Image: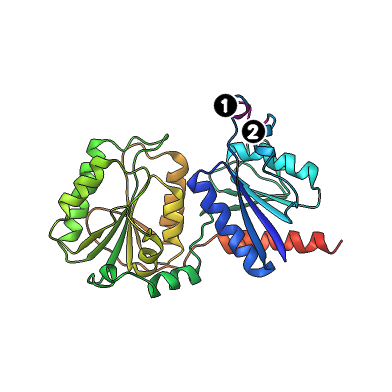
Amino acid sequence: MAMIWTLTDGKAGDAQQCLGVAQAVCAVTGGRIVEQTVSPRRFYALAMPWGLPDPADLAVLTAPWPDIAIASGRRAVTYLRWLKKRSPLTLTVFLKDPRTGTRAADFIWVPEHDRLRGDNVLVTLTSPHRQSPAVLAAGRAGARPELLALPQPRVAVLAGGPSKDLRFDADDIAAFVSALAQLAQTGAGLMVTPSRRTPAAMKRAITQALAGTNAWIWDGEGTNPFGEMLGLADAFVVSADSTNMLSEAAATGKTIHVFMPKGVPPKILHLIDGLIAHGAVVKFDGHLENHPYQPLDSTPQITREILTRFFSASQR
């Protein structure tokens, strides 16, 4: 029975990746997961990932130490290094490039667009996540009546928005909404969920454009329908601003229609090109296509690597 820590500064993308891997590991080892969130003050945060941890956080990060610690995010690197010094038997795992080299953790996963390589580094096209086959099945089984009432094909629309690397300006919003309206006119059932980055103006434009069509748009109230939508979807529309959303959709084997705003960053372009080569992605222009493919899911592969190292260390 293993104790597993996830260690992040609370950013949703990092936390979900760590939790997805931790849950997959825990399904094999048993035990429990403890979600640890650090909040370094500005003086300490500016020096990370090379500086010292904030003592205020260390007052919470106390023994018993975990058997496995899974971390992600620049600020978490410092704390993972600190943990390894206090608990050498803990298997430390870092998701994405820690920026401090391969010695930052016992095992490191990076996406293909990151340059870090080494004997303890696993490289995959897509990112880890929580959307396992069991989770998708549970989403289908527990889907709310409003989603089940939509006609097929049901299309999950994962709407993003601006990020630090992508503007997603008014012209992009207009083009995205226009293509969605065109798709809605085919009679497909649209299941729409905005992300945390979706601007209010974009939400309003989508709502107005899809009024009177077979569309259900999550208003942000109650339980997030994301898992239900992934389980029910016959196809996806995803805006090209999130590697996580693309990776989660790719785990289903259903065609992903990607909307390309201007200035998509190279790391996301690399992922999209790889997904196109795999047969998972087409460019979204308002039309629906159906190209089944072998689902892509890096989470089991990452999990196997962690378990191999964990059980090997425990037998020494």
Q: Where does residue 217 sit, x and y in percent of width and height?
A: 26, 57
Residue 282: where, in percent of width, then height? 33, 56
- Mark 1 or mark 2, earlier in chain: 1
Q: Residue at x 79, y 47 (%)?
A: 87
Closest to the observer, 104 or 250:
104
Left or right of 184, for residue 268: right
Report crowding for label 2: few under 14, some 14 to 19, many 20 or more residues within 10 A (C-alpha).
Answer: many
Residue numbers of the magenta segment? 44-50
The CA span between labels 1 and 2 is 13 Å
Which residue corresponds to mark 1? 42
- The dot on residue 49 is 2
SS at badge 1: helix
Mark 2: amino acid: Pro
Residue 62's spot in the image, x, y percent? 72, 46
Query: Is the image coloured rainbow, by chain, by secondary structure, or in one colour?
Result: rainbow
Predominant SS of the magenta segment? loop
Q: Relative to 103, is 238 on the left or the right?
A: left
The C terminus sits in image quarter = bottom right
Report the amino acid beneath label 1. Arg
